[in-house]
Image (spheres, rainbow, N blue to C red):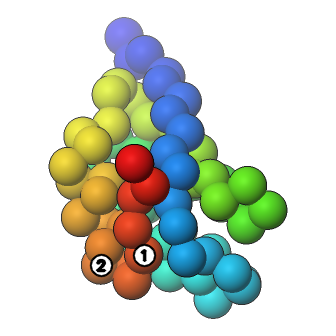
């Protein structure tokens, strides 16, 4: 049985459609991730996954996209 999990992270530096595409592309590659929603207005990234999101892997994906997870 899969347990759907929704997790929201604050990410700094995102300002445009290219930012959305870069973040979505990298985060979608993470294990168990089924959907990624980026909100430029709030600087949030909401991840739907089949289980908990590995926060270190998420931070690495955000770094790869050129951004940073807010503290």
Residue 25 against residue 18 in the figure, above or below: above
Give 42 or 28, whichever is nearer the viewer: 42
Q: Residue furthest top?
A: 1
Q: Nearer the viewer, mark 1 or mark 2?
A: 1
Q: Residue furthest right?
A: 41
- Secondary structure, mark 2, is helix
Residue 5 against residue 68 in the figure, above or below: above
Residue 6 visible in the shown view: yes
Q: Position of residue 7 (x, y in %)?
A: 50, 34
Give 43 or 1, whichever is nearer the viewer: 43
> Label 1 belongs to which residue?
67
Mark 2, Cα crowd under 10 Å, few <14 / some 14-19 / many 20+, is some
Residue 61 against residue 47 in the figure, above or below: below
> Label 2 belongs to which residue?
64
Give 52 or 4, whichever is nearer the viewer: 52
Residue 39 against residue 1 in the figure, above or below: below
Q: Residue at x 63, y 89 (%)?
A: 18
Q: Residue at x 79, y 62 (%)?
A: 41
Q: Residue at x 55, y 76 (%)?
A: 13
Q: Which mark is residue 6?
A: none
Q: Quadrant of the N terminus?
A: top left
Residue 46 quadrant = top right
Q: CA distance from mark 1 to mark 2?
A: 7 Å
Q: Residue at x 49, y 22 (%)?
A: 4
Query: Answer yes or no: do the residues labelled 1 and 2 have beta carbons within 8 Å?
Result: no
């Amino acid at each position: 049985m899969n347990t759907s999990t929704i997790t929201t992270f604050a990410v700094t530096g995102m300002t445009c459609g290219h930012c959305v595409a870069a973040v979505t592309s990298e985060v979608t590659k993470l294990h168990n991730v089924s959907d990624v929603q980026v909100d430029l207005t709030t600087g949030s990234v909401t991840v739907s996954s089949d289980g908990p999101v590995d926060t270190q892997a998420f931070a690495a994906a955000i770094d790869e996209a050129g951004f940073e997870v807010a503290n």
